[in-house]
Image: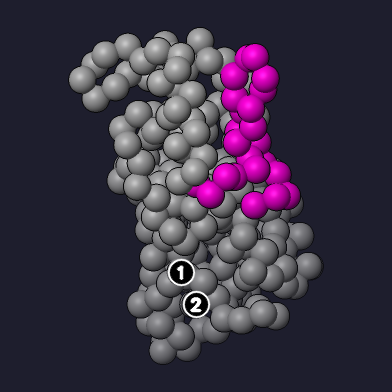
């Protein structure tokens, strides 16, 4: 199911939008603060963001610029009472793809959401994340929080396999089947152990990368990072 993150501090408006869009088979996750939305974006990427301008902890245009700097392909629609031409221009200059002024018609909002998704596609699969670790598959970029992490080809492959199977145990046998060195040579068990150790070191010993003794490894969200 397509998922949208919606930053809105008015529970009545948020509830109406959520109820309507979910009847259209679009899951909506509501965030009452910009900080909550930003934290969620570091963990998992939705298909789109609906963004109010005036929030209790700041202005939506600041978060919009942050998204463009960190998740540049993510579609963004401003959904706000600020309808002056200067505000609309500022919203687009901040990186928004569309701008809807309150009050709005739910059917029109849904049509604009659908049009933007058709144009941009669902970008959520481009990014994988677990706690503070994120992978941009298009750019082959790995970050830990705001830090860009340089990985070897083998380390990247191991992390990619684990992230794609987040929440599930990946056996050492499966990793050995899928991971090859840059010269196309099969990786042995000892090399895999060394690679995982180096990967952990580069990612600052993340608590979300678990060892399942005598079996393999598992990536899972934790409260430790």
Q: Secondary structure at mark 2?
A: helix
Residue farthest to the left, as pictured: 183
Q: Nearer the viewer, residue 46 or 88?
A: 46
| Residue assigned mark 2 | 62
Q: Quadrant of residue 51?
A: bottom right
Magenta stretch encompasses residue 113: no
Magenta stretch encompasses residue 217: yes
Image point (78%, 67%), residue name: 11
Q: Which residues are magenta?
A: 203-225
Near mark 2 (Cα within 10 A), the count class, few <14, some 14-19 or many ≥20, is some
In contact (CB < 8 Å): disc 2 and disc 1: yes
Q: Is residue 158 left or right of residue 171?
A: left
Instruction: Report whether residue 121 is seen.
Output: no
Looking at the magenta stretch, what is its main secondary structure?
loop
Q: Nearer the viewer, residue 25 or 134?
A: 134
Image point (44%, 51%), residue name: 143
Q: Position of residue 156 (x, y in %)?
A: 38, 34
Q: Position of residue 180 (x, y in %)?
A: 32, 18
Near mark 1 (Cα within 10 A), the count class, few <14, some 14-19 or many ≥20, is some
Q: Is residue 204 left or right of residue 57?
A: left
Q: Position of residue 197 (x, y in %)?
A: 50, 33
The answer for how far apart the CA atoms under marks 2 and 1 are is: 6 Å
Number of numbered discs:
2
Q: Position of residue 42 (x, y in %)?
A: 55, 55
Above or below, 182 relative to 75: above
Q: Nearer the viewer, residue 223 or 30?
A: 223
Image point (44%, 59%), residue name: 147
| Residue assigned mark 1 | 66
Above or below, 156 relative to 65: above
Q: Quadrant of residue 191?
A: top left
Image point (59%, 19%), residue name: 216
């Amino acid at each position: 199911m397509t998922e949208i993150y919606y930053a809105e501090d008015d529970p009545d408006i948020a509830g109406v939008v959520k109820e309507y869009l979910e009847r259209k088979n679009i899951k909506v996750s509501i965030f009452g603060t910009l900080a909550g939305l930003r934290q969620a974006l570091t963990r998992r990427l939705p298909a789109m963001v609906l963004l109010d301008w005036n929030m209790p902890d700041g202005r939506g245009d600041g978060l919009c610029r942050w998204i463009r700097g960190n998740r540049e392909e993510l579609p963004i629609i401003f959904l706000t009472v600020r309808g002056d031409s200067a505000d609309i221009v500022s919203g687009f200059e901040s990186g928004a793809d569309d701008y809807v002024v309150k009050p709005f018609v739910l059917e029109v909002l849904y049509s604009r959401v659908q049009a933007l998704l058709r144009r941009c596609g669902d970008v959520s699969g481009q990014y994988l994340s677990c706690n503070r670790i994120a992978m941009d598959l298009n750019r082959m970029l790995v970050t830990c929080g705001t830090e860009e992490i340089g990985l070897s080809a083998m380390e990247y492959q191991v992390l990619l396999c684990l992230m794609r199977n987040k929440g599930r145990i990946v056996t050492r046998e499966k990793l050995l089947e899928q991971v090859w060195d840059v010269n196309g040579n099969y990786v042995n068990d000892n090399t895999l152990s060394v690679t995982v150790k180096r990967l952990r070191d580069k990612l600052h010993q993340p608590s979300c990368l678990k060892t399942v003794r005598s079996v393999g490894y598992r990536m899972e969200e934790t409260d430790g990072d």
